[in-house]
Image (cartoon, rainbow, N blue to C red):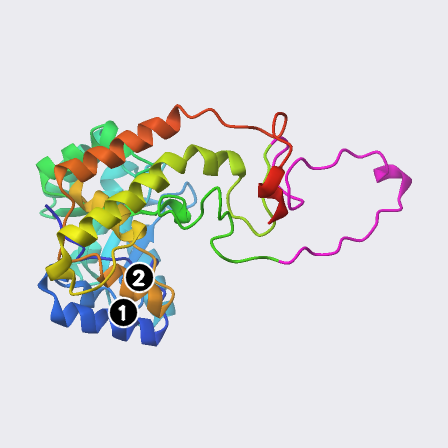
């Protein structure tokens, strides 16, 4: 089972103080392994296949340009972006990755957004060139379980490819930070005064159904809220389960935690670990760094996982009140 030991520089665009907090935690906890290698900027680079590029040489040139722009000599991981049409085919892409590794421009090679079949193809193609496929970066969280259900995670596990879970908290929706009763995550945005439209052309234009003045018709959103009320209603069972499991873990692991609290976000990240992936948690503040570091030293039990999985399914079957049947109530008073 993988631990919380890797993270992406594109996710960890942390300030210097946050990075020092992470490195200190890494030095004190073996669970985090070699995360210190990836807390520096530009730990990875992604090559996106395009019809405007041709052959294996384009991969090498693209990485050379990136290294020069970043002012570094190499990257830890060179990822091949989501499969698409490419002049020269996949074999030339694999050859390009192999050349980059051979020349010391990258230490490892990975892919991004690959499903089970595509991972097998990339793994076999790179193996013929003497290169090991080390990772597959996919969107994976409690609310985005496609890689788990379509066999991608199992295939990666069988081939020894590490699954890197991008957006493991689903932008905060899977962390109980944004809820139906706290849609702004504790931040209250002031309403901006809008200029009155005097043009006759727009006089009879339909008003947006979204509270806060934006979003698609029929979906209400509180001022400053990131998610629509319908989305928050769907995740109410999960948010309740995350808080409940966090409390249970805090009681169960009291000695190991040494008085530290367990947050719903930490539970969500450990769910990803339990399912066989390494979460790439975004770290932008010292608080974020401390929260990620607090994920280690404890694990979820089978009962915890079952509670969370059931809550996700319950949320899918939750009937939501749309703007057509919901007049706003207290929610729109935020």
Q: Circle 2 is placed at which residue position?
A: 9
Of residues 97 and 331, the one drawn nearer to the viewer in this rendering: 331
Q: Secondary structure at mark 2?
A: loop
Marks 1/2: CA–CA distance: 7 Å
Q: Report if residue 74 is visible in the image.
A: yes
Of residues 118 and 88, the one drawn nearer to the viewer in this rendering: 118
In the image, the segment drawn in magenta is 190-218
**Most distant residue in the front direction:** 251
Residue 141 % position (x, y) = 30, 41
Residue 80 % position (x, y) = 28, 46
Q: Report if residue 278 is visible in the image.
A: no
Residue 125 % position (x, y) = 16, 38
CA neighbours of label 2 inside 10 A, class few (<14), some (14 to 19), many (20+):
many
Q: Is residue 149 above or below residue 79?
A: above
Mark with earlier residue (1, 2): 2
Q: Quadrant of the N terminus?
A: top left
Q: Secondary structure at mark 1?
A: loop
Q: Circle 1 is placed at which residue position?
A: 40
Give the residue displayed 27% in from the left and 29% down from the top.
310
Left or right: residue 193 versus residue 36 is: right
Count of numbered circles on the image: 2
Asked if marks 1 and 2 touch (Cβ < 8 Å), the reply is yes
Give the residue displayed 14% in from the left and 63% down from the top.
34
């Amino acid at each position: 089972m993988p631990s919380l030991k890797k993270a992406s520089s594109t996710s960890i665009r942390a300030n210097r103080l946050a990075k020092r907090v992470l490195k200190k935690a890494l030095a004190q906890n073996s669970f985090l392994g070699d995360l210190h290698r990836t807390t520096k900027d530009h730990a990875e680079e992604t090559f996106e296949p395009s019809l405007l590029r041709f052959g294996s040489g384009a991969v090498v040139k693209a990485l050379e340009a990136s290294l020069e722009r970043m002012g570094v000599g190499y990257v830890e991981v060179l990822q091949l972006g989501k499969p698409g049409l490419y002049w020269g085919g996949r074999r030339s892409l694999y050859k390009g990755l192999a050349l980059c590794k051979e020349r010391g421009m990258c230490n490892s090679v990975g892919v991004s957004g690959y499903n089970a079949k595509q991972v097998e193809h990339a793994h076999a193609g790179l193996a013929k060139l003497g290169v090991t496929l080390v990772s597959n970066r996919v969107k994976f969280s409690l609310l985005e379980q496609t890689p788990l259900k379509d066999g991608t995670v199992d295939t990666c596990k069988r081939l020894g490819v590490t699954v890197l879970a991008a957006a493991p908290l689903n932008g905060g929706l899977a962390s109980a930070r944004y809820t139906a009763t706290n849609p702004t995550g504790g931040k209250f945005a002031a309403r901006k005064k809008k200029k009155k439209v005097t043009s006759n052309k727009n006089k009879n234009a339909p008003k947006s159904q979204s509270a806060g003045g934006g979003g698609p018709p029929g979906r209400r959103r509180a001022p400053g809220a990131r998610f629509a009320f319908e989305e928050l209603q769907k995740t109410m069972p999960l948010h309740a389960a995350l808080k409940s499991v966090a409390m249970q873990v805090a009681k169960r692991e009291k000695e190991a935690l040494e008085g530290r609290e367990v947050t719903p976000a930490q539970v969500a990240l450990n769910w990803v670990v339990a399912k066989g992936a390494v979460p790439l948690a975004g770290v932008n503040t010292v608080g974020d760094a401390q929260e990620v570091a607090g994920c280690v030293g404890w694990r979820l039990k089978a009962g915890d996982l079952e509670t969370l999985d059931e809550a996700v399914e319950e949320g899918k079957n939750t009937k939501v009140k749309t703007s057509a049947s919901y007049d706003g109530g207290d929610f729109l008073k935020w």
